[in-house]
Each structure stands twice: as structure tokens, then as C-alpha cells.
Amino acid sequence: MSADPLPPTIEWADGFVRLIDQRRLPGELVLLECRSVDELCEAIRTLAVRGAPALGAAGAMGVALAAATGEPLEDAADRLRATRPTAVNLAWGVSRALAAADPAAEAVRIAAEDVERNRRLGAHGAELLPVDARVLTHCNAGSLACVGYGTALGVIRAAHEAGRRPSVWVDETRPVLQGARLTAWELQRLGIPCTLVADVMAGSLMASGDVDAVVVGADRIAANGDVANKIGTYGLAVLARHHGVPFYVAAPVSTLDPACPDGAAIPVERRPDEEVAALAGVPLAPPGIAVENRAFDVTPADLVTAYVTEEGVARAPNDLPL
């Protein structure tokens, strides 16, 4: 991966975990080393590492850390799972490493598989985008949300690499600004034309005919096809349906949760009040104001035009490889 303009988001480094500290982007590219399960749990909770596929690798590497440091594996697994309850990949990665004879080897395997899966996913999804497509995306579902390559941005990246000349409307993604800080950073490094917009501008862009497709990632897809993704995704799906814009969800098969019947059964993480009431430590609201900070919302399956996984394009929930 040395030729890739984007370094690996997370990797096992022979006894510890090395990851890009996404809290420091876009100002500086800093690698964080986690040498205990507690350090990794803190990195996950504080969004130093985030994104469903990346969390799958992080969960497996956390179990490997516990094995390397002599911590009880089941206790470590419980602490890791509790850090981010919505992203099903985290628990999936933990479970795979727990079941392996060598958790570290399994973690390395999961990381390598992630990049390969995302490249396959991107190739399938690129065929959905017309030449010169103007694509709107939300949050960050690129290389930084995975071990490498990306899911929603993987689709756009594959289209770019195939010479289809996509350009991207980048939602800022309040309140933590993953779009402004992370997606824009990735796209610039990849040389893909992009324009940052306020989240509330999406409807105006669709109304003026400036959006050809919406492509987003997912943190969990229920058995009926309902999709949990970063807060604001549901609103985009409603706008896309109203304006006749295709709405695509790109996610690996590990994000599918056949044990979860529908979106109502997906746990939605609540995050700290200060993410909404302040920005970079600067207060935006009066002291003591009540804050509701849901990190995710659920988009009903009937608003999804198609799902893109490494296995192909599914036009209906029944076609998903559950």
C-alpha cells in the first residue's frame, strides 16, 4: 500500500495497534499507537478511529492486544463492544478474533480482507454512476472509515480510476464535521474534484438539478434493508426520493445484520452534548441548554435505490447476501 496516497487507517504492528488519529485531521497527519485495550477503547470512543469497517478491524486488534498483554479476552471483548453500539462491524471483528486460535493473525487477515472487499465493492458501484456524475455524499465513508480504499468513497474512487470523471458534493456533516475534515481531505489527496457544502444545502442542490446520485455508507443494515448511518442520512434519502435522485448505500457484507429484524431494533448511539453545543472547544450555545445528540438515524429500505456490497449490486433487500 506504499503507493497509495492514503496510508492505512489502522494496522497491527507486532504487539500494538497503529492508527491515524482522525481527531487531528485535516490539520496534521498523526499516527497514534495503542498498546493496551483501554487505550484502544479510548481511541474508539473519542473518534480517533471511526467508520464501521475500520471498527471491525479495531475490534479484532483489540482482542489481539488483550492476548498480547495477558488481559482476559472476554472482558476485553465486552469493553470493546460497548464503545460504539451502533456499528455492527465492531462486534463482528471482536467475535472473529475471539474465535481464532491466533487473534493477531486473524486481525491482520481482517485488515487485508477489508481493502480487497472495498476494491470489489467500488468496482461494482462505479458502474452505477454515469460519466461526469455529480455525486453527493455524507459523513466519511472513505479510506479513513475502513482499513483502506473506502465504501461510498470507494465507489467514487473506482469511477475516478476508470476515467468516468466524477465530482463530489461533500456534506460538512454536523456536528463533528467528518465530511469537512475527513472526506474533503481524502478527495483532495486522491485528486478527485470536490466542493464542500453546508448540510442544509443538499435540498437546494437537488432542486437545481446539480446532483446525479447520492452515495452513502452504513453502520448497520437490518434484515429488512433499513439502514443506520450518520445522522442526516435519512433526510438526504427523503430529499433524493422527492427529487428523483438515486440513493445508493455502499457497505461490506460484514455490515449486514440478519439478526436485527428492522431499523427500530438498531441501537442508536447518543454522544456527548458538547459535540453540538461547542465547536473545537468554543461554545456555540448558552450554558446549560438541553442537547439531544443522536449519532445516527435510520433510513427505511423503501428509500434506498440499491445497495452495493463486495458481492454486487442489490436492488431490493431480498437480494442482499444476508
Image: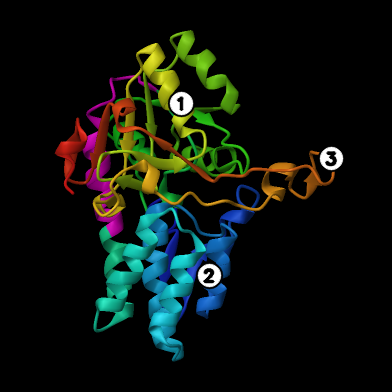
Q: CA distance from mark 1 to mark 2?
A: 31 Å
Identity of the residue furthest to the bottom in this view = 70
Residue at coordinates 28% horizontally, 70% vertically from top-left?
96
Position of residue 249 in the picture relative to residue 290 (left or right): left
Q: Nearer the viewer, residue 322 or 126?
A: 322
Other residues around mark 1 within 10 Å, as few (<14) / some (14–19) / many (≥20): many
Q: Amino acid at mark 3?
A: Pro
User: Against 169, is 322 above or below?
Assistant: below
Q: Judging from the image, what secondary structure is the residue with disc 1 in?
A: helix
Magenta part of the chain: 114-134
**Residue wearing tag 1:** 236
Position of residue 16 in the picture relative to residue 291 (left or right): left
Q: Nearer the viewer, residue 161 or 133?
A: 133
Other residues around mark 2 within 10 Å, as few (<14) / some (14–19) / many (≥20): many
Q: CA distance from mark 1 to mark 3?
A: 29 Å
* Mark found first going from the N terminus, 1 or 2: 2
Magenta highlight on residue 164: no
Q: Judging from the image, what secondary structure is the residue with disc 3 in?
A: loop
Q: Nearer the viewer, residue 150 or 313?
A: 313
Residue at coordinates 55% horizontally, 43% vertically from top-left?
178
Q: Amino acid at mark 1?
A: Leu
User: Against 166, is 122 above or below?
Assistant: below
Q: Nearer the viewer, residue 247 or 228?
A: 228
Other residues around mark 3 within 10 Å, as few (<14) / some (14–19) / many (≥20): few
Residue 7 in view, yes or no: yes
User: Against 200, is 322 above or below?
Assistant: below
Residue 181 image position (x, y, % from top left): 59, 43
**Residue wearing tag 3:** 286
Residue 248 image position (x, y, % from top left): 32, 30
Q: Which mark is residue 41?
A: 2
User: Residue 277 is drawn in which quadrant?
Assistant: top right
